[in-house]
Amino acid sequence: MKNEIRNLVFDLSEGREIFDAESNRVVDVKEANEVLRKFMLEELGLNEKSTHREIKRAFETEAGREFFQVVEEIIDRVINTGWTQSEFFNQFVDVRNMADGDRNDFYAEKPMILTVSKVSGDHHDISVQRLNEGETYTVPTSVFAVKVGSNIREFLTGRKDWGKFIAAVAEAFLQEVQNEMYNEFMNAADKMPAQYKKTGALGPATKDNLDALIEDVSMVNYNVPVVLMGTKTALKKLNGLYESGAGLNWIADSLKESVAHTGLLGDYEGTVLMEIPQRFEKNNTAQKLVDNAKILVIPLVDYKPIKFVDYGETEITVDQVAAKMDDRQTYEVQRKMGVGSVISRYFGVWTIGQ
């Protein structure tokens, strides 16, 4: 594939401004997609009237395979940069980029107070072990796969933007792995000792209990600051601490403005609030992934409990069976990754009751 076309594919997938030096102007996305389509038709020996069978066979040629290799590179780049855009990921996830065959060993510098656990695929199989000081552990890995059906003919005839399709595949991978991370983190909270697990409605009557939990988590971690983490729905329950009894009239005006504009307190008496984005379970919009009834009290220390290993090579296969059945080219995008957790710090969880 020509270098200028490779660059065009990368620019389209990453939403960059495309400048044509020959004409000394910025090229719009529609025009850039048209250039890419014409190039593909020529390289694949196709035209806009090509049949489904002809298109399928064209993508089985060397030119077709080369195109998918470029797509694999694009998805690698998008995924590798996508992690860093998550506040949760940057704060709490320890990343290992692996080569195939490498051991993803992590070293325990101190005894683990909780467990190493694994959540695999959609089945949520949990494996548990306790670690002593000086031991190593390995995060089990799985092949994460996303299947996307797309009619190639729609792209080649100008009815579909291929760059958006690539971005959607990469985003699906990001969502899949982040879902595993959030689920892993929330499950770890259930394993905390009773002292760090509290339940009840959030109101003036329970305010002292919440304050005590925040203080306990801070003290057990050598008096470091903590943050309160939860979904927006969960964090909004903190407003109830002031909605009766003492009322909102004694909190700072800046916090009143925060409640008015976002529905959330900007912080809780100096303790920062961090929102965990809510997500639906995969292929199930009736089931939410993150528990709206839990607020986590997390110490701000140089410690990342979620362990993520990424072997960093995306592979695309074309499912020809599906193509024969319903005229679609079905792509399965695969990447070897693993998510686990090791808890060496105590943290708290408040389960919001009625």
Image: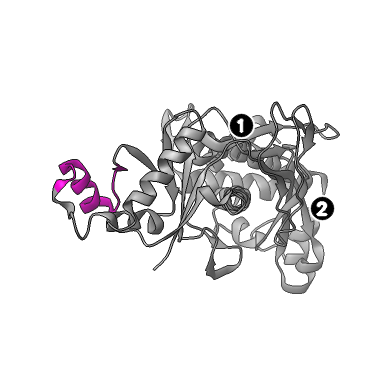
Amino acid on which disc 1 is placed: Glu
What's the CA distance linking mark 2 and mark 1?
Answer: 23 Å
Residue 1: give x, y in percent of width and height. 71, 36
The answer to whether residue 345 is above or below residue 291 is above
What secondary structure is marked by label 1? helix
Residue at position x 29%, y 43% in the image: 266
What secondary structure is marked by label 2? loop
Nearer to the camera, 38 or 170:
170
Residue at position x 48%, y 31% in the image: 20
Residue 48: give x, y in percent of width and height. 64, 59
> Contact, CB < 8 Å: mark 2 with mark 1?
no
Disc 1 target residue = 4
Q: Quadrant of the C terminus?
A: bottom left
Instruction: Identify the disc placed on residue 60.
Output: 2
Residue 90: give x, y in percent of width and height. 53, 34
Neighbours of disc 2 within 10 Å: few (<14), some (14-19), many (20+): some
Mark positioned earlier in the residue sequence (2 or 1): 1
Neighbours of disc 1 within 10 Å: few (<14), some (14-19), many (20+): few
Residue 141: give x, y in percent of width and height. 77, 45
